[in-house]
Image: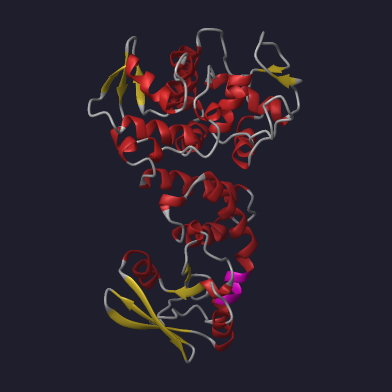
């Protein structure tokens, strides 16, 4: 049913092409470095960006949607910027006329053997795009793992493409094959990864997104060991189902901004769990504790202390994976039922005041 598809932007951004993988990556560099004149259909040259590829890049989440049409100035999204940072020093990617499928396979093979971190990053970006989510929804309607190419005319019609679907859908096939979801044959498409198709927001995608958050923050940190522990605490509070590129970027900014706040809150409780009072001393002499966000950051939870609690590792896991029900908030305590067992989150008076004054 069409209402299940992601249709929040114009169809031209959801199904477009041809848009070879190599050209997409090259365009990211051209856009960032302002080495283009305009975009539009016509002869390909060093400074002209073609309209089809620009539209496809919007659907992939790499560039911002132009206000009226792709002939205007084009800017990278946060994910586009993150991609540029990873490819800016690399040589130009192969992009030959009428050879895009074979070029994609060469690029994929090279990245897997020489640049595996970049390959994994690109997969995480592509699989979280509207384009790939829509494609997964369509493939989910097919019971067989072999789909004749002619059947994709129906996919084109979903997005208002009654003609030339055979020219525009292949760009989606290529991205899907690049990500290991399908394999394009001469007359049919073979589904390789049915797990992604059945659940395009799988836990595996959450793990990839979490890995990218961790790598980005450690990359910018002077103290890797210290920051790694802090990153893990915040990441555990993110819902894997909501770790989209936008949420990843927001989480990175939140972690950077609130390192000091989290440390001060731990000091307030001397590292003791607000539920069971347990802690233990680390090698550096400090008491160990973890930050928990009552409403996860990945679900638009607040980054204020009113949404934070100090927990031991055991209670932290329970708050994530057990059945949780909150009761009354009185006398510096929050009643909470963990798998039906009554517990109390005990607050320091200063912390409790912030909780009372906030709507979280």
Q: Tell me, yes or no, if residue 89 can be seen here.
A: no
Q: Nearer the viewer, residue 151 or 354?
A: 151
Q: Is residue 264 magenta?
A: yes
For image coordinates 66% across by 35% down, the residue present is 76
Q: Is residue 63 left or right of residue 292?
A: right
Q: Residue 133 in the image: state x and y as whole percent.
A: 42, 36
**Quadrant the N terminus occupies:** top left
Q: Tell me, yes or no, if residue 45 can be seen here.
A: yes
For image coordinates 31% across by 68% down, the residue present is 322
For image coordinates 36% across by 66% down, the residue present is 317
Vertical position of residue 138 compared to residue 301: above or below = above
Tell me which colouring the rendered structure shows. Answer: secondary structure
Q: Nearer the viewer, residue 78 or 257?
A: 78
Q: Is residue 87 magenta?
A: no
Location of residue 105 (image quadrant)? top left
Q: Is residue 172 left or right of residue 28?
A: left
Q: Residue 30 in the image: state x and y as whole percent.
A: 70, 25
| Highlighted range, magenta | 261-265
Q: Residue 23 in the image: state x and y as whole percent.
A: 59, 19
**Quadrant the C terminus occupies:** bottom right
Q: Residue 156 in the image: state x and y as whole percent.
A: 43, 22
Q: Please give the count of numbered marks on the rendered protein.
A: 0
Of all residues, the one furthest to the left in this rendering is 144
Q: Is residue 274 left or right of residue 265?
A: left
Q: Which secondary structure class fits the magenta region best? A: helix
Vertical position of residue 154 compared to residue 97: above or below = below
Of all residues, the one furthest to the bottom in this rendering is 331
Vertical position of residue 352 compared to residue 227: above or below = below
For image coordinates 52% across by 59% down, the residue present is 300
Location of residue 354 (image quadrant)? bottom right
């Amino acid at each position: 049913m069409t209402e299940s598809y992601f249709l929040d932007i114009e169809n031209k951004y959801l199904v477009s092409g041809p848009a070879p993988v190599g050209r997409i990556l090259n365009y990211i560099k051209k856009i960032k470095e302002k080495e283009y004149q305009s975009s539009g259909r016509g002869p390909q040259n060093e400074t002209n960006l073609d309209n089809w590829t620009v539209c496809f890049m919007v659907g992939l989440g790499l560039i911002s949607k132009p206000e009226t049409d792709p002939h205007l100035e084009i800017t990278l999204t946060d994910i586009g910027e993150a991609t540029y940072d990873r490819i800016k020093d690399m040589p130009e990617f192969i992009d030959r006329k009428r050879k895009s499928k074979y070029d994609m396979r060469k690029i994929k093979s090279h990245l897997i053997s020489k640049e595996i971190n970049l390959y994994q990053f690109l997969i995480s970006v592509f699989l979280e795009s509207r384009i790939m989510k829509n494609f997964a929804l369509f493939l989910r309607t097919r019971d067989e793992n072999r789909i004749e190419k002619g059947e994709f005319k129906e996919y084109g019609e979903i997005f208002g493409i009654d003609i030339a679907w055979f020219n525009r859908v292949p760009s989606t096939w290529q991205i899907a094959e690049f990500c290991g979801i399908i394999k394009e044959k001469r007359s049919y498409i073979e589904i390789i990864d049915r797990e992604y198709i059945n659940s395009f927001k799988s836990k595996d995608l959450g793990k990839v997104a979490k890995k990218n958050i961790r790598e980005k923050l450690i990359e910018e940190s002077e103290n890797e060991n210290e920051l790694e522990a802090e990153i893990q605490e915040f990441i555990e509070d993110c819902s894997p189902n909501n770790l989209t590129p936008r949420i990843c970027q927001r989480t990175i900014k939140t972690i950077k901004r609130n390192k000091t706040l989290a440390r001060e809150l731990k000091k307030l409780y001397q590292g003791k769990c607000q539920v069971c009072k347990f802690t233990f001393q680390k090698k550096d002499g400090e008491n160990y504790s973890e930050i928990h966000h009552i409403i996860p950051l990945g679900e638009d939870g607040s980054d204020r202390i009113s949404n934070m609690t100090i927990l031991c590792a055991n209670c932290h896991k329970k708050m994530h994976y057990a059945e949780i029900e909150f009761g009354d908030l009185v006398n510096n305590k929050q009643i909470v039922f963990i798998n039906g067992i009554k517990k109390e989150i005990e607050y320091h008076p200063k912390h409790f005041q912030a909780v009372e004054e906030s709507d979280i």
